[in-house]
Amino acid sequence: MYLNSIFSDPERMERLVGIAQTSFLPLIEAAVQFTLPLSVISFILGLILAVLTALARISTVRPLQWIARVYVSIIRGTPLLVQLFILFYGLPTVGITIDPFPAAVIGFSLNVGAYASEVIRAAILSIPKGQWEAADTIGMSYSQTLRRVILPQASRVSVPPLSNTFISLVKDTSLAALILVTEMFRVAQQIAATNYEFLLLYGQAAVIYWVICFSLSLVQGRLEHRFDRYVSR
Protein backbone atom coordinates (compact mmCIF):
# COMPACT_ATOMS: atom_id res chain seq x y z
CA MET A 1 0.00 0.00 0.00
CA TYR A 2 2.76 2.44 0.93
CA LEU A 3 4.74 1.79 -2.27
CA ASN A 4 1.61 1.89 -4.39
CA SER A 5 0.69 5.28 -2.96
CA ILE A 6 4.14 6.58 -3.86
CA PHE A 7 4.37 5.27 -7.42
CA SER A 8 0.80 6.25 -8.23
CA ASP A 9 1.36 9.84 -7.09
CA PRO A 10 4.13 11.64 -9.03
CA GLU A 11 3.95 14.68 -6.75
CA ARG A 12 4.52 12.58 -3.66
CA MET A 13 7.37 10.76 -5.37
CA GLU A 14 8.99 14.07 -6.25
CA ARG A 15 8.53 15.29 -2.67
CA LEU A 16 10.16 12.17 -1.22
CA VAL A 17 13.10 12.41 -3.61
CA GLY A 18 13.57 16.05 -2.63
CA ILE A 19 13.49 15.18 1.09
CA ALA A 20 15.99 12.35 0.57
CA GLN A 21 18.36 14.64 -1.30
CA THR A 22 18.21 17.49 1.22
CA SER A 23 18.52 15.18 4.24
CA PHE A 24 21.44 13.12 2.93
CA LEU A 25 24.14 15.69 3.65
CA PRO A 26 22.97 16.49 7.23
CA LEU A 27 22.90 12.77 8.00
CA ILE A 28 26.42 12.27 6.63
CA GLU A 29 27.68 15.30 8.55
CA ALA A 30 26.18 13.94 11.77
CA ALA A 31 27.81 10.57 11.12
CA VAL A 32 31.23 12.18 10.55
CA GLN A 33 31.00 14.72 13.38
CA PHE A 34 29.38 12.59 16.07
CA THR A 35 28.64 8.94 15.23
CA LEU A 36 32.12 7.90 14.11
CA PRO A 37 34.08 9.99 16.68
CA LEU A 38 31.81 8.69 19.43
CA SER A 39 32.45 5.14 18.27
CA VAL A 40 36.23 5.52 17.96
CA ILE A 41 36.76 7.40 21.24
CA SER A 42 34.53 5.02 23.18
CA PHE A 43 36.19 1.96 21.67
CA ILE A 44 39.72 3.15 22.43
CA LEU A 45 38.87 4.04 26.03
CA GLY A 46 36.87 0.84 26.38
CA LEU A 47 39.75 -1.23 25.02
CA ILE A 48 42.16 0.27 27.56
CA LEU A 49 39.66 -0.47 30.31
CA ALA A 50 39.16 -3.98 28.91
CA VAL A 51 42.88 -4.79 29.04
CA LEU A 52 43.13 -3.58 32.65
CA THR A 53 40.01 -5.51 33.62
CA ALA A 54 41.22 -8.69 31.92
CA LEU A 55 44.58 -8.46 33.69
CA ALA A 56 42.76 -7.92 36.98
CA ARG A 57 40.62 -10.99 36.32
CA ILE A 58 43.67 -13.25 35.80
CA SER A 59 45.76 -11.71 38.57
CA THR A 60 46.38 -13.45 41.87
CA VAL A 61 45.30 -10.38 43.85
CA ARG A 62 41.86 -11.24 45.23
CA PRO A 63 40.56 -7.67 45.67
CA LEU A 64 41.39 -6.85 42.03
CA GLN A 65 39.67 -10.02 40.87
CA TRP A 66 36.58 -9.17 42.92
CA ILE A 67 36.37 -5.58 41.66
CA ALA A 68 36.76 -6.70 38.04
CA ARG A 69 34.15 -9.43 38.43
CA VAL A 70 31.61 -7.05 39.96
CA TYR A 71 32.20 -4.45 37.25
CA VAL A 72 31.78 -6.97 34.43
CA SER A 73 28.72 -8.50 36.08
CA ILE A 74 26.96 -5.15 36.52
CA ILE A 75 27.64 -3.91 32.99
CA ARG A 76 26.78 -7.21 31.30
CA GLY A 77 23.73 -7.69 33.49
CA THR A 78 22.05 -4.35 32.77
CA PRO A 79 20.83 -2.85 29.47
CA LEU A 80 23.04 -0.28 27.79
CA LEU A 81 20.11 2.11 27.51
CA VAL A 82 19.57 1.98 31.27
CA GLN A 83 23.26 2.71 31.84
CA LEU A 84 23.08 5.77 29.58
CA PHE A 85 19.94 7.03 31.32
CA ILE A 86 21.56 6.65 34.73
CA LEU A 87 24.59 8.67 33.60
CA PHE A 88 22.65 11.45 31.89
CA TYR A 89 19.29 11.64 33.67
CA GLY A 90 20.00 9.90 36.98
CA LEU A 91 23.25 11.46 38.19
CA PRO A 92 21.93 15.08 38.10
CA THR A 93 19.58 14.14 40.94
CA VAL A 94 22.65 13.72 43.17
CA GLY A 95 24.36 16.84 41.87
CA ILE A 96 26.47 15.29 39.10
CA THR A 97 25.68 16.72 35.66
CA ILE A 98 27.39 15.41 32.54
CA ASP A 99 26.95 16.85 29.06
CA PRO A 100 25.38 14.56 26.44
CA PHE A 101 28.51 13.65 24.45
CA PRO A 102 30.77 12.92 27.47
CA ALA A 103 27.94 10.94 29.08
CA ALA A 104 27.65 8.85 25.93
CA VAL A 105 31.42 8.30 25.81
CA ILE A 106 31.48 7.17 29.44
CA GLY A 107 28.51 4.86 28.97
CA PHE A 108 29.77 3.24 25.79
CA SER A 109 33.34 2.95 27.12
CA LEU A 110 32.18 1.18 30.26
CA ASN A 111 30.05 -1.16 28.17
CA VAL A 112 32.82 -1.96 25.70
CA GLY A 113 35.29 -2.40 28.54
CA ALA A 114 33.19 -5.07 30.22
CA TYR A 115 32.43 -7.11 27.11
CA ALA A 116 35.86 -6.74 25.51
CA SER A 117 37.58 -7.71 28.76
CA GLU A 118 36.10 -11.19 28.47
CA VAL A 119 37.40 -11.44 24.91
CA ILE A 120 40.89 -10.35 25.94
CA ARG A 121 40.89 -12.57 29.03
CA ALA A 122 39.94 -15.59 26.93
CA ALA A 123 42.62 -14.71 24.37
CA ILE A 124 45.29 -14.46 27.07
CA LEU A 125 44.24 -17.75 28.63
CA SER A 126 44.35 -19.41 25.20
CA ILE A 127 48.11 -18.88 25.00
CA PRO A 128 49.84 -22.14 26.03
CA LYS A 129 51.30 -22.16 29.53
CA GLY A 130 54.63 -23.15 28.03
CA GLN A 131 54.97 -19.62 26.65
CA TRP A 132 54.94 -18.23 30.20
CA GLU A 133 57.41 -20.87 31.37
CA ALA A 134 59.77 -20.26 28.46
CA ALA A 135 59.78 -16.52 29.14
CA ASP A 136 60.44 -17.18 32.81
CA THR A 137 63.42 -19.41 32.05
CA ILE A 138 65.17 -16.61 30.12
CA GLY A 139 64.66 -14.17 32.99
CA MET A 140 61.67 -12.16 31.80
CA SER A 141 59.52 -10.51 34.45
CA TYR A 142 55.72 -10.88 34.50
CA SER A 143 55.20 -7.51 32.82
CA GLN A 144 57.87 -8.21 30.19
CA THR A 145 56.27 -11.57 29.41
CA LEU A 146 52.88 -9.95 29.00
CA ARG A 147 54.16 -7.12 26.83
CA ARG A 148 56.58 -9.04 24.62
CA VAL A 149 55.17 -12.57 24.45
CA ILE A 150 51.57 -12.97 25.57
CA LEU A 151 49.74 -9.83 24.48
CA PRO A 152 51.10 -9.84 20.89
CA GLN A 153 49.80 -13.37 20.43
CA ALA A 154 46.55 -12.65 22.24
CA SER A 155 45.94 -9.59 20.06
CA ARG A 156 45.86 -11.80 16.95
CA VAL A 157 43.28 -14.08 18.55
CA SER A 158 41.24 -11.07 19.68
CA VAL A 159 40.95 -9.34 16.30
CA PRO A 160 37.73 -11.00 15.03
CA PRO A 161 35.64 -10.63 18.22
CA LEU A 162 36.95 -7.13 18.97
CA SER A 163 36.20 -6.07 15.41
CA ASN A 164 32.65 -7.34 15.87
CA THR A 165 32.45 -5.38 19.11
CA PHE A 166 33.43 -2.18 17.31
CA ILE A 167 30.90 -2.76 14.54
CA SER A 168 28.20 -3.35 17.14
CA LEU A 169 29.28 -0.17 18.91
CA VAL A 170 28.79 1.87 15.74
CA LYS A 171 25.20 0.66 15.62
CA ASP A 172 24.66 1.15 19.34
CA THR A 173 25.61 4.83 19.09
CA SER A 174 22.06 5.39 17.83
CA LEU A 175 21.02 5.03 21.47
CA ALA A 176 22.89 8.26 22.20
CA ALA A 177 20.01 10.06 20.46
CA LEU A 178 17.95 9.36 23.58
CA ILE A 179 20.35 11.39 25.73
CA LEU A 180 20.33 14.31 23.28
CA VAL A 181 23.56 13.61 21.38
CA THR A 182 23.03 14.96 17.87
CA GLU A 183 24.43 11.89 16.15
CA MET A 184 23.03 10.59 12.88
CA PHE A 185 19.87 8.93 14.16
CA ARG A 186 18.87 11.98 16.20
CA VAL A 187 19.31 14.16 13.11
CA ALA A 188 17.05 11.73 11.25
CA GLN A 189 14.48 12.09 14.04
CA GLN A 190 14.66 15.87 13.91
CA ILE A 191 14.22 16.00 10.13
CA ALA A 192 11.39 13.45 10.22
CA ALA A 193 9.60 15.51 12.88
CA THR A 194 9.34 18.40 10.41
CA ASN A 195 8.01 16.48 7.40
CA TYR A 196 6.51 13.33 9.01
CA GLU A 197 8.29 11.05 6.53
CA PHE A 198 9.57 8.74 9.27
CA LEU A 199 9.96 5.65 7.12
CA LEU A 200 12.03 7.49 4.55
CA LEU A 201 14.35 9.19 7.05
CA TYR A 202 14.81 6.16 9.27
CA GLY A 203 15.37 3.97 6.22
CA GLN A 204 17.94 6.43 4.90
CA ALA A 205 19.76 6.38 8.25
CA ALA A 206 19.65 2.58 8.25
CA VAL A 207 21.29 2.46 4.81
CA ILE A 208 24.10 4.76 5.96
CA TYR A 209 24.65 2.61 9.08
CA TRP A 210 24.77 -0.46 6.84
CA VAL A 211 27.32 1.09 4.48
CA ILE A 212 29.54 2.08 7.42
CA CYS A 213 29.33 -1.36 9.03
CA PHE A 214 29.85 -3.14 5.71
CA SER A 215 32.99 -1.07 5.11
CA LEU A 216 34.23 -1.92 8.59
CA SER A 217 33.59 -5.62 7.97
CA LEU A 218 35.81 -5.42 4.88
CA VAL A 219 38.57 -3.83 6.96
CA GLN A 220 38.08 -6.59 9.54
CA GLY A 221 38.55 -9.23 6.85
CA ARG A 222 41.81 -7.65 5.71
CA LEU A 223 43.09 -7.47 9.28
CA GLU A 224 42.29 -11.12 9.88
CA HIS A 225 44.03 -12.08 6.64
CA ARG A 226 47.08 -10.01 7.61
CA PHE A 227 47.37 -11.68 11.01
CA ASP A 228 46.79 -15.14 9.54
CA ARG A 229 49.97 -14.77 7.49
CA TYR A 230 51.97 -15.22 10.67
CA VAL A 231 50.20 -18.41 11.69
CA SER A 232 51.74 -21.71 10.68
CA ARG A 233 49.37 -24.14 8.98
Image: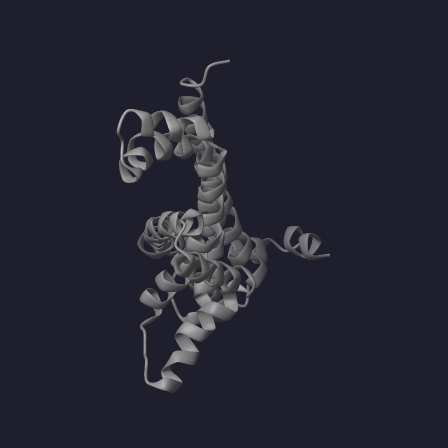
Looking at the rendered image, the quarter that the N terminus falls into is bottom right
Looking at the image, residue 41 lies above or below residue 136: below
Q: How many numbered circles are shown?
A: 0
What residue do we see at 57% from left, 53% from top? 13
Please indicate whether residue 6 sits to the left or right of residue 76 in the image.
Answer: right
Q: Nearer the viewer, residue 19 or 156?
A: 156
Q: Nearer the viewer, residue 211 or 121?
A: 121
| Residue 215 makes an appearance in the image | no
Q: Nearer the viewer, residue 112 or 233?
A: 233
- In this view, the residue farthest toward the right is 1
- In this view, the residue farthest toward the top is 233
Q: How is the image coloured?
A: one colour
Residue 27: x and y in percent read 40, 55
Residue 162: x and y in percent read 45, 41
Looking at the image, residue 224 lies above or below residue 163: above
Residue 34: x and y in percent read 34, 57
What residue do we see at 46% from left, 73% from top? 85
Residue 147: x and y in percent read 29, 35
| Residue 177 makes an appearance in the image | yes
Looking at the image, residue 197 lies above or below residue 112: below
Quadrant of res 173: bottom left
Q: Nearer the viewer, residue 166 or 3?
A: 166
Please indicate whether residue 6 sits to the left or right of residue 208 in the image.
Answer: right
What residue do we see at 42% from left, 17% from top? 229
